[in-house]
Image (cartoon, grey):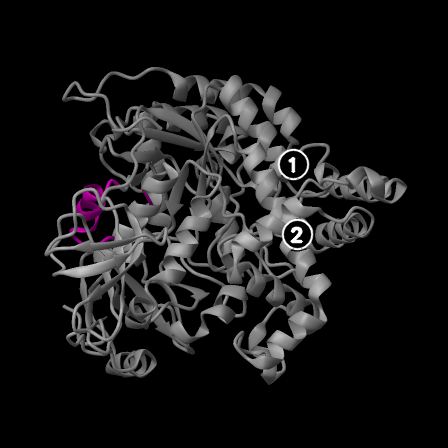
Amino acid sequence: MADAWGIEEYYDDVEGRRHRVSPDTVAALREVIGTPPQDGDGRDDPQTLVRRRGDRVGPAELVLEDGAELRIGDVLPPDLPFGYHILRRGGEETAHRLIVGPGRCHLPGRRAWGWAAQLYATRSRDSWGIGDLADLGRLARWAADECRAGFLLVNPLHATAPVAPIQASPYFPASRRFRNPVYLRVEEVPGAGRAGADLQEAAARGRELNRRRHIDRDAVWRLKLAALEAIWRCAPPGPEFDQWRARQGDGLREFATWCTLAEQYGGNWRIWPQEYRHPAGPAVGRFAREHADRVRFHAWLQWLTERQLTENASGVTLIQDLPVGVDPGGADAWSWQDLLAQGVSVGAPADEFNTEGQDWGLPPFVPWKLRRAGYRPFADSIRATVAAAGGLRIDHVMGLFRLWWVPSGAGAGQGAYVRYPAADLLDIVALESHRAGALVIGEDLGTVEPGVRETLAEYGVLSYRLLWFEQDDPATWPEHAMAAVTTHDLPTVAGLWDGSDLEAQRRLGLEPNEESSGAVRRRLARGGGLDAGAGGEEAVLAAHQLMARAPSVLLSATLDDALAEPERPNIPGADDQRPNWCLALPVPLEELQSAPLPRKLAAVLAEPRARPRDGREPGGEAP
């Protein structure tokens, strides 16, 4: 049970052992959270009401999202449009934000499989040192036409600070509302042809970066930024861009202003001159007016990125990833600093693969402040991430219920869980899923408290099941789930099978759980019929044949495994010792498309499966 601040004073670890949180931790978190207000009768206290059709709200007047006005009786009518409305009750002096949704996410209509790709790592010969949105389009066409894949799951494509050093981790974004222009294919920008020889020279230098296995984002961005600036000067955008920019409103203006300030003062707003540290300050407005052309330039980069993403996401369902939080020095934290907890970060307690726990360095929203803000930051982040996509994967979906807060200066294991209004947040996820026609997957891995998976299922959020974590026969896994062998944070099949992943962790001075890793390897050998002399490719095929026994509506395989790559994209806790999130695939996209193992893997996963045990096709609506 949580206290009045939402803090749980006890928690159970992955082994089921109960621990009491340190009183010092509780006191530190209470101070950060502040005193949550008590909901009054609403007369002078604007509230956020998250409701369903048919719910009782009392006689009221509604101003609907489209501006229409409606008088209602005691309950919300059955044909009330889903959306974000304003509610006013008679005798009250204030209006309330009313959020009305379907209560259930869009569901996939049929079983499908797909590739899980780190886009930055998926380079073609035409890339400028990093996989880009044109590469995404090529990958999508190959996946759909030649592999019979139904979806692509890609790493977060969210924005980072536009200055060196460029943040490598896709899960540490400056903003979850805007995208990273480093993924632009510069040659396909409108007006690029006018840049002439300068662009050709930049492209040649960019392609030269493909010779390095490790991605140098700083070098990539220097080249791309200079080329984009040249296009901006010789081929400025027309009215179509200005109309788009006007529709985006204050959010884009504020983000573009932050980018411009970051170029002047660095990518961490917390060390800027004091007058620029809050977006509402008068100095920020003056700065934006004085640098209007550069602010407009950064807005243009967002327009280009949206266009290229939309153009290259067609033909296959694109599932985008939503990180747990944002860079504390980034754009969203600047905009929403009054709602974020200062002096704490989120992470996870110890589990079988991370024995010391994890501190992700991301600041959490204070739950009561988020609700007072009408959940706008959360809704905006969900909406932006499902745009141009057919699906959403919510990283660490348990964070909608509770998050592990770690006080500054404490070890990752010295935190406590803080509860969130899960029902409200899930209703918003369902609303945005319904509007976008996007399926939702919840990454429910690690320590999952009782009842969470059942609640997610009620909302139509698909579970996420991994061969590395599950000890049961995949044939017993749930239908409403995405099944996979591994993720970006866990060993690849080849790395687990040949022991190189464990050796890498030892070399980095980490403390891997060798017993658990050995048990997973033995399960793979036994279930996949592998002998000790089997090679990496044999292990990859065996692992995916085993996983494909699952009746789950979605199956996925990583491109790393499609190439029997032993190194994984990320080893948690090793950012200072290893180039996490910087390892390109060992071959360019052109060679991936013609390699034999991806085709064999695709054949395994595309093979029709028997109907579920109850005889029904899994899923619901057509995708």
Left or right of 173 on screen, residue 606 = left
Depicted 17 relative to depicted 229: above or below:
below
Q: Nearer the viewer, residue 86 or 369?
A: 86
Depicted 293 relative to depicted 609: above or below:
below
The boundaries of the magenta stretch are 441-460
Residue at the far right in the pictured view: 197
Left or right of 473 on screen, residue 277 = right
Under mark 1, the amino acid is Arg
Depicted 12 relative to depicted 199: above or below:
below
Depicted 510 relative to depicted 431: above or below:
below
Mark 1 neighbour class, 10 Å CA radius: few under 14, some 14 to 19, many 20 or more: many
Could you tell me residue 119's position as x and y percent? 57, 40
Left or right of 47 on screen, residue 568 = right
Q: Quadrant of the C terminus?
A: top left
Q: Nearer the viewer, residue 408 or 54?
A: 54
In this figure, which residue is indicated by the disc labeled 1? 123
Between disc 2 and disc 1, whose residue precedes? Answer: 1
Under mark 2, the amino acid is Trp
Residue drawn at (49%, 64%), measured in percent from left and top? 332
Left or right of 548 on screen, residue 205 = right
Using the rendered image of the protein, determine whether residue 473 is visible from the camera's viewpoint: yes
User: How many numbered discs, if any?
Assistant: 2
Residue drawn at (57%, 39%), measured in percent from left and top? 309
Residue 316 shows which numbered tag? none
Q: Which of labels 2 and 1 is toward the front?
A: 2
In this figure, which residue is indicated by the disc labeled 2? 300
Q: SS at mark 2?
A: helix
Residue 269 falls in image quadrant = bottom right
Q: SS at mark 1?
A: loop
Could you tell me residue 368's position as x and y percent? 28, 71
